[in-house]
Amino acid sequence: MVYLALAVWGAVHPMYWFVTYMRETGTGLSGLIDAWYVNASTTGLTWDLTIAAITLTVWILAETWVRKNWLALVAIPATFCIGVSCGLPLYLFLRTRAV
């Protein structure tokens, strides 16, 4: 249940800041994405999270193929639509259940 709680937190907390930023700037999603590349620090963080998301996806696909835990595949869209902070704990939660 800790993994599930972390997945919910990983979805809600970052989204709060994203929505706050978009409201303050009035630029919407395109402005948020532009902000990811505003300087070397944010660009590095963006690439760090992108590489982590791709790595997590490869891991999910490899383990799903072996374990036949098809429900665990929902962690992939959670990772790319919400973030690694949601996708990773969600996958760990789904991975720990009996198959």
Image: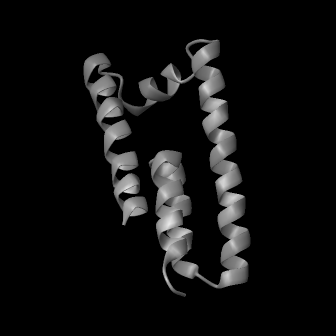
Q: How is the image coloured?
A: one colour
Left of 4 or right of it: where is 99? right
- Most extreme residue toward the top is 39
**Residue 7 quadrant:** bottom left
Task: Note whether 84 is above or below 78 in the view shown.
Answer: above
Residue 83, image x and y in percent?
A: 49, 46
Residue 52 visible within the image: yes
Residue 83 visible within the image: no
User: Residue at the location (55% across, 73% down)?
Assistant: 95
Residue 46, image x and y in percent?
A: 60, 30
Residue 56, image x and y in percent?
A: 65, 55
User: Residue at the location (66% across, 32% down)?
Assistant: 47
Left of 3 or right of it: where is 51? right
Residue 69, image x and y in percent?
A: 58, 81
User: Residue at the location (47% across, 50% down)?
Assistant: 81
Task: Note whether 3 is above or below 40 in the view shown.
Answer: below
- Most extreme residue toward the front is 2
User: Residue at the location (51% across, 59% down)?
Assistant: 77
Q: Quadrant of the N terminus?
A: bottom left
Front-most of residues 31 and 48: 48
Left of 62 or right of it: where is 84? left
Q: Quadrant of the C terminus?
A: bottom right
Task: Note whether 4 is above or below 38 in the view shown.
Answer: below
